[in-house]
């Protein structure tokens, strides 16, 4: 069974997710240029919301970092171990885990590692258990290896740590593929429902301390351009509920909490790109949530023909296009949903989805969680 989420969300001038030239990301779809926000950007915003909005406690979250050495050493010193020994043992533990260090910065791992808070705590516990062995291990010596029992113990800590964000979004450890986690969630790149071009904001900044004396050059102290666009995005994601429970070691209570955090964060989160410049803080116009047996289905093709605002406006036209596509798919393939709920600011624009309407976003979240196969609201 899958939970699917579909959102329409309109943003005034903004630059939520930039490319390597600082321009808003774009994509071709339906033969025209669209605004785009990458799935990585929105997943990062969701993970930030898990913490900022207290959707998940720290022990049920993960951290993505190159500073694993520091994280382990800090836990060891908190347990009363001397700082110099804690750093040495932590370094030995990182190497015994099978991870290497950055060639330019020996305090950082070679790449970002995504570990649960409980996993890091477990690594510290293994360091405590094998303190003398790790202290004697000299990883800087070529050909040196930690005792096999130590390696097995340390690598045994990499079980996902019941971290909800790792369970949802997965992880890849290049050097330890047996400890990779298959993501339970798929998040699509958000694309605009309509054709979008990029605009340029030419800005100037004044020097507040510049003398206003006669003959002084009163020109700008700084000038430049910022690229932006404005778009109504279609956003889509799904969660494989069976995979989520497996990733969380069968803990259905935690799976329910993870599902609740995912639903709430997918609705509320907004990428942080250029927010101080544009304050692009918009709520979704439409939220559709469905439980579906079998293959999930995106509704992106609702916008293969770019939406035109027309007399009803861009928001209502986008809602109408999504509703029409949903109805056509239901006619051709059957509904296929075991539960469906829609909340929208444009209820007059829905026909195929009309019998699925609920009063507001919170009512939708409540219905989704109450119908969860994990059992009850979270």
Image: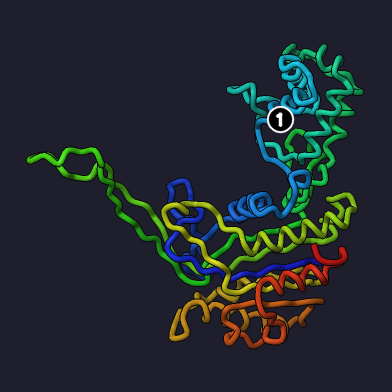
Residue at 58% from the left image edge and 87% from the top image edge? 348
Residue at 46% from the left image edge and 81% from the top image edge? 313
Quadrant where the C terminus lies? bottom right
Element marked by disc 1:
helix
Residue 261 appears in which quarter of the rendering? Answer: bottom right
Q: Is residue 278 left or right of residue 79?
A: left
- Relative to 92, say whether 308 is above or below: below
User: Is residue 248 or residue 138 the one in the foreground?
Assistant: 248
- Relative to 318, say whether 252 is above or below: above
Residue at 86% from the left image edge and 14% from the top image edge? 132
Instruction: From the image, tell me which residue sits under label 1.
Output: 71
- Relative to 115, say whether 307 is above or below: below
- Relative to 39, say whether 288 is above or below: below
Outermost residue to the left:
214
Residue at 24% from the left image edge and 38% from the top image edge? 209
User: Is residue 331 or residue 205 the one in the foreground?
Assistant: 205
Mark 1 Cα shell of 10 Å, populated few (<14), some (14-19), many (≥20): some
Quadrant where the N terminus lies? bottom right
- Residue 307: x and y in percent read 50, 77
- Residue 64: x and y in percent read 68, 40
- Residue 83: x and y in percent read 72, 17
How many numbered tags mark residues here? 1
Q: Is residue 325 left or right of residue 28?
A: right
- Residue 323: x and y in percent read 62, 81
């Amino acid at each position: 069974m899958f939970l699917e989420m579909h959102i329409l969300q309109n943003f005034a001038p903004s630059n939520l997710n930039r490319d390597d030239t600082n321009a808003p990301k774009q994509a071709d779809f339906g033969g025209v240029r669209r605004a785009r926000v990458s799935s990585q950007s929105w997943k990062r915003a969701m993970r930030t919301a898990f913490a900022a909005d207290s959707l998940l406690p720290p022990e049920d979250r993960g951290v993505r970092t190159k500073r694993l050495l520091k994280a382990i050493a800090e836990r060891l010193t908190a347990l009363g171990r001397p700082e110099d020994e804690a750093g040495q043992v932590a370094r030995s533990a990182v190497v015994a885990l099978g991870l290497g260090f950055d060639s330019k910065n020996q305090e950082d791992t070679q790449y970002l590692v995504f570990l649960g808070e409980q996993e890091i705590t477990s690594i510290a516990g293994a360091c405590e258990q094998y303190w003398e062995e790790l202290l004697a291990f000299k990883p800087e010596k070529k050909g040196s290896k930690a005792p096999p029992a130590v390696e097995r113990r340390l690598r045994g800590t990499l079980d996902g740590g019941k971290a909800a964000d790792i369970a949802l979004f997965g992880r890849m450890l290049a050097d330890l593929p047996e400890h990779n986690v298959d993501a339970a969630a798929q998040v699509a790149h958000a694309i605009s429902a309509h054709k979008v071009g990029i605009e340029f904001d030419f800005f100037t900044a004044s020097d507040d301390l510049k003398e206003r004396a006669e003959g002084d050059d009163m020109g700008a102290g700084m000038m430049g351009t910022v690229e932006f666009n404005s778009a109504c995005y279609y956003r889509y994601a799904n969660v494989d509920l069976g995979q989520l429970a497996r990733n969380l070691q069968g803990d259905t209570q935690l799976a329910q909490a993870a599902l609740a955090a995912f639903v709430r964060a997918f609705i509320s989160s907004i990428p942080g790109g250029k927010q101080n410049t544009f304050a692009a803080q918009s709520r979704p116009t439409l939220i559709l949530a469905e439980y579906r047996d079998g293959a999930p289905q995106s509704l992106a093709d609702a916008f293969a023909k770019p939406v035109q605002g027309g007399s009803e406006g861009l928001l209502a036209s986008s809602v109408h296009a999504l509703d029409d596509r949903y109805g056509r798919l239901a006619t051709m393939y059957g509904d296929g949903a075991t539960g469906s709920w829609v909340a929208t600011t444009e209820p007059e624009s829905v026909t195929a989805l009309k019998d699925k309407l609920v009063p507001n976003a919170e009512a939708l979240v409540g219905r989704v969680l109450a119908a969860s196969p994990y059992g009850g609201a979270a």
